[in-house]
Amino acid sequence: MIQDLKNEDIINKVGGRFRLTALIQKRWKQLMMGARPLVEPGRMTPMEIAIREIIEGKIAYSEPENNRGEQDA
């Protein structure tokens, strides 16, 4: 599963390595707090579930609300 992170397709799907890392971290935290997986978890760890959800297009990165629409003065 970790090998999937080296695939440029998943990196490009979310807009870069930083966004991929942020998305995995956010979803991992949600899963650890009890959120339901959007894929069949089987014996996967929460991190593996988050990665699988990204690969399958179940979740996507979105800009934080406070960054939307801001312009330099």
Image (tube, rainbow, N blue to C red):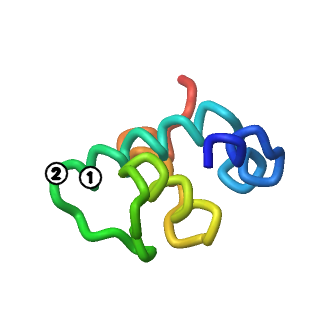
Rendered location of residue 60, percent (x, y): 54, 60
Q: Which residue is mark 1?
A: 30
The residue drawn where x is 47% and y is 44% is 24
The residue drawn where x is 80% and y is 46% is 7
Circle 2: element type: loop
Rendered location of residue 3, percent (x, y): 71, 42
In this picture, residue 9 sits left or right of residue 23? right
Is residue 12 shown above or below 66? below
Is residue 72 shown above or below 40? above
Is residue 24 shown above or below 35? above
For the C terminus, which image quadrant? top right
Is residue 68 in sight in this rendering?
A: no
Q: Disc 2 marks which amino acid?
A: Met
Is residue 13 in sight in this rendering?
A: yes
Q: Which residue is mark 2?
A: 33
Circle 1: element type: helix
In this picture, residue 39 sits left or right of residue 19? left
Using the numbered discs, state the Cα–Cα distance from disc 2 to disc 1 in whole angstroms.
5 Å
Rendered location of residue 33, percent (x, y): 16, 51
The residue drawn where x is 52% and y is 65% is 53
Rendered location of residue 6, percent (x, y): 76, 38
* Nearer to us in this view, 66 or 22: 22
In this picture, residue 21 sits left or right of residue 25? right
Q: Are marks 2 and 1 in contact (CB under 8 Å)?
A: yes
In this picture, residue 41 sits left or right of residue 72? left
Residue neighbourhood size for the residue with mark 1, other residues' Cα within 10 Å, grouped as few (<14), some (14–19), many (≥20): some
| Quarter of the rendering containing residue 72 | top right
Q: Disc 1 marks which amino acid?
A: Gln
